[in-house]
Image: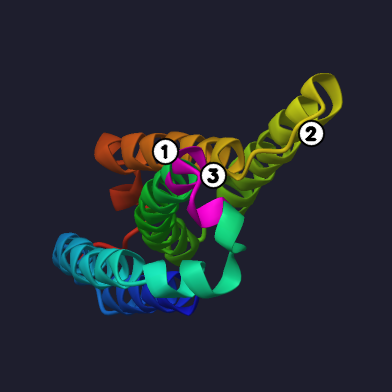
Amino acid sequence: FFIMDGLGKGVGILCSNFIGTQQPWQIGNVLKQAWKLVAVFALFFLIFLMCSWPIVRFLADESFLKDPQFIHQVLLFFVWYWMLFVFETVEFCIRYFLFALLKTKITLFVSVVAYWGGCLLPTYFLISCYQVNPIILTQTAGLEKVLLILLFAFWYRMGTWKKVCPQKN
């Protein structure tokens, strides 16, 4: 979590500094560099997950390790958890960029609505299906992050944020 939050706050601070110094053209460079860092951290996290099978062997009961369905579920969970990490990191960068533009009400409203959806959908599976599946939970959280990324990226691509940036006289 510290990677996501730190990278997002760094993007927000740099973007607000560029807005304050009337250099809005630098914002695109900050976001490009953030995507590169997301790719690097995603690669490191993928390597960590690939090397974490000894931890699973240590924590799991021996009977579970003999079950191919359990192994498949663990590997599927790792894949979805890695994707969730990537989506959340990108979403944090865009969110803090919007915070830098003082779009806090819009960002917080959309985030709260998305989090409520992200909480209610797994609760539906718990109550109606009487099951909790960590893969369904990570898929739901990943879908929530993708929707937020698409919404925030659409808002960014519209270019309305440029009206917030001060113009040189």
Q: Callout 1: helix, strand or loop?
A: helix
Q: Distance between the residues labelled 3 and 2?
A: 13 Å
Where are the magenta residues, as a range? 64-71
Q: How far apart are marks 1 and 2 (CA)?
A: 20 Å
Name the residue at the top extreme: 128
Q: Which of marks 1 and 3 is nearer the N terminus?
A: 3
Kindly identify the amino acid type of the residue bearing the numbered disc 1.
Answer: Val
Residue bearing mark 3: 138
Tell me the number on the disc at residue 123.
Answer: 2
Q: Distance between the residues labelled 1 and 3?
A: 12 Å
Residue bearing mark 1: 146
The nearer-to-camera label among 1 and 3 is 3
Q: In this view, does 102 lie above or below 41?
A: above
Q: Which of marks 1 and 2 is nearer the N terminus?
A: 2
Prevailing secondary structure class for the magenta stretch in the rendered image: helix
Residue at 41% x, 76% y: name it: 3
| Residue 107 in magenta stretch | no
Local crowd at mark 1 within 10 Å, few (<14), some, or many (≥20)? some
Q: Callout 3: helix, strand or loop?
A: helix
